[in-house]
């Protein structure tokens, strides 16, 4: 089993970006441009490496390889995006890798692109790239090219050596468990060994909601691979497990005018097999709350006025400050109730919310995460 933290260190130490490896400060697949560029890089790396894995490391400075981290990205449906836009899509996996020096909310993103021995191309137009375009790696660049010769396999031995040097061992596993238990000692850390092989650590603050045990500030890590499987600073999570699986049910708190309820968002089941492999199944179980349209019209228009006042740097009334704290969630509810422009308004307001306060901006990112999960399904 590969220790992904060690793999990232080996990739960064190996050499600069090349035909099997790319690095990014960040990606933004919530915007059309960012989505198009990400698809371009996946397409190019897949075509340039028909026999071996390719990797994209996210959260690294381009100039000096400094590990700075990005937000936890828990989108298990990224393969749906790949399948929708690419012909002969490769299997793509996005993983969140914690590093000791990063803050709790930051990780390094690792995108693994599996070889598929087929020519990958854009299925349809996106941003400034045309459907049918074929991309390849030219040094550290992903470039459109005309395919007329068979691509030679020049990377398999190099990639195999890098992956072999990143294999996990008992010391790395034990160090990972001790580090987790020590770092998370304020959040009731626990661990469990599955199938005498997999070591899962998790922690959270327990709370009771209508006689149901939920956890907040949840962190779940697969120590064998140094992969963070789940992280939440806001949401409530129900956890259950047996000897064969570990189940997470994520809840989101939504409502209007101080009337909030918990809604199930997504169920994740980690299944552990006897052959030293595990699989992760996710199921969206979210049913958006429905509200009176007349009330929503009032809230929608009031929030637009607040955004205009923020843009003009006009002083907000006390009740508007309260509404602003709930603005991202309110726009999300409006969107789920037929206000199609609500999310466009919210995305446009992103710089304003970021400048206003960290709390409101965190709420914005949480709303966009929920929306991403729903849209990809």
Image: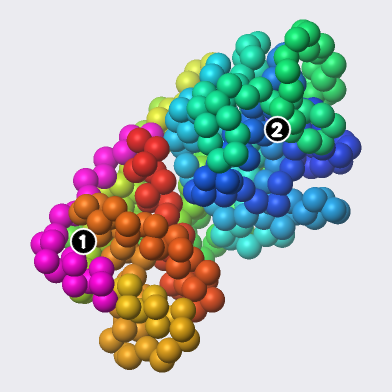
Q: Where is residue 368 in the image (x, y as percent from the top left)?
A: 42, 54
Specify whether 328 is left or right of 22: left
Element type at mark 1 = strand
| Alpha carbons under labels 1 and 2: distance apart | 41 Å
Q: Is 247 colored magenta in this rendering?
A: no
Look at the image and tell me whether residue 374 can be seen.
yes
Look at the image and tell me whether residue 163 can be seen.
no
In the image, 91 versus 8, the foreground residue is 91
Specify whether 196 is left or right of 318: right
Magenta residues?
282-302
Q: Where is residue 361 in the image (x, y as percent from the top left)?
A: 47, 68
Residue at x 85% of width, y 53% of height? 63
Q: Residue 55 carries which label?
A: 2
The crowding category of the residue bearing disc 1, from other C-alpha atoms within 10 Å (few below 14, some 14 to 19, many at least 20), is few
Vertical arrangement, residue 167 with respect to residue 250, above or below: above
Residue at x 78% of width, y 35% of height? 141
Where the N terminus falls, by quadrant? top right
Residue at x 39% of width, y 37% of height? 376
Q: Which residue is labeled 1 in the image?
A: 261
Where the C terminus falls, by quadrant? top left
Pointer 1 and pointer 2: residues touching (CB < 8 Å)? Answer: no
């Amino acid at each position: 089993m590969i220790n992904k933290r060690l793999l990232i260190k080996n990739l960064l130490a190996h050499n600069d970006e090349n035909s099997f490896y790319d690095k990014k400060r960040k990606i933004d697949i919530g915007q059309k441009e960012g989505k198009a560029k990400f698809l371009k890089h996946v397409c190019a790396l897949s075509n340039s490496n028909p026999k071996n894995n390719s990797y994209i490391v996210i959260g690294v400075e381009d100039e000096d390889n400094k590990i700075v981290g990005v937000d936890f990205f828990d989108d298990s449906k990224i393969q749906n995006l790949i399948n929708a836009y690419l012909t002969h899509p490769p299997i793509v996996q996005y993983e969140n890798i914690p590093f000791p020096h990063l803050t709790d909310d930051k990780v390094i993103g690792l995108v693994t692109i599996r070889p598929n021995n087929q020519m990958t191309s854009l299925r349809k137009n996106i941003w400034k790239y045309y459907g049918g375009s074929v991309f390849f790696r030219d040094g550290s660049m992903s470039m459109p090219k005309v395919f007329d010769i068979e691509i030679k396999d020049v990377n398999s031995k190099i990639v195999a050596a890098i992956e072999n040097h990143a294999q996990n061992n008992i010391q790395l596993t034990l160090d990972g468990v001790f580090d987790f238990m020590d770092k998370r000692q304020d959040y009731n850390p626990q661990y469990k060994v599955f199938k005498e092989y997999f070591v899962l650590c998790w922690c959270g603050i327990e709370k009771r909601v209508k006689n149901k045990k939920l956890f907040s500030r949840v962190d779940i890590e697969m120590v064998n691979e140094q992969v963070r499987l789940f992280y939440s600073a806001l949401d409530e999570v129900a956890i259950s497990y047996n000897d064969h699986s570990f189940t997470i049910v994520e809840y989101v708190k939504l409502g209007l005018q101080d009337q909030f309820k918990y809604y199930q968002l997504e169920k994740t089941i980690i299944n552990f097999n006897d052959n030293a492999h595990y699989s992760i199944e996710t199921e969206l179980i979210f049913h958006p709350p429905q509200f009176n349209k007349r009330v929503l019209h009032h809230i929608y228009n009031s929030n637009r006025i607040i955004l205009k006042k923020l843009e003009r740097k006009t002083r907000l009334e006390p009740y508007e400050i309260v509404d602003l704290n709930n603005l991202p969630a309110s726009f999300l509810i409006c969107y789920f109730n037929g206000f199609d422009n609500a999310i466009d308004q919210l995305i446009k307001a992103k710089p304003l919310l970021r400048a206003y306060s960290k709390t409101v901006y965190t709420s914005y990112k949480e709303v966009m995460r929920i929306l991403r999960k729903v849209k990809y399904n």
